[in-house]
Amino acid sequence: MTRIEHFKKQLARIFDNDLRTKQWENYPDYVIIGFIILSTLSVFISTFNVGPLCEKVLSVIDIVTVIGFTSRDACAP
């Protein structure tokens, strides 16, 4: 098996839609889901009138999630 075939099999296993497989044991899934939940909560909380400390925390969360979603190796094992 070539490296490309092996890589394709790993990607297919990670992004498998079947919830009965062991896909939820993959760390990239946990990281992506965590970033989605964290980003959603951050956007929801930022719609309220919050204090300056909370705004700083939300800003850090936004930066971390953007870096996580755009980083090339954010979910690499």
Image (spheres, grey):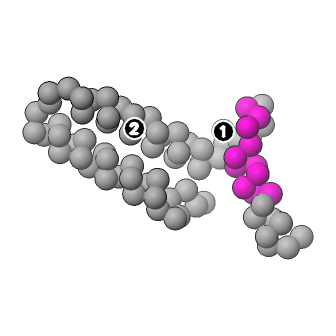
**Residue annotated with mark 2:** 38
Badge 1 element: helix
Check the image and report above or below for 60 versus 38.
Answer: below
Marks 1 and 2, the one that precedes in the sequence: 1
Tell me residue 53's x, y (percent).
Answer: 13, 40
Tell me residue 45's x, y (percent).
Answer: 27, 29
Most distant residue in the top direction: 48
The tag on residue 13 is: none
Q: Is residue 72 left or right of residue 10?
A: left
Q: Quadrant of residue 2?
A: bottom right
Badge 2 element: helix
Number of on-image labels: 2
**Residue annotated with mark 1:** 24
Check the image and report above or below for 21 versus 3.
Answer: above
| Magenta stretch bounds | 9-19
Tell me residue 65's x, y (percent).
Answer: 39, 49
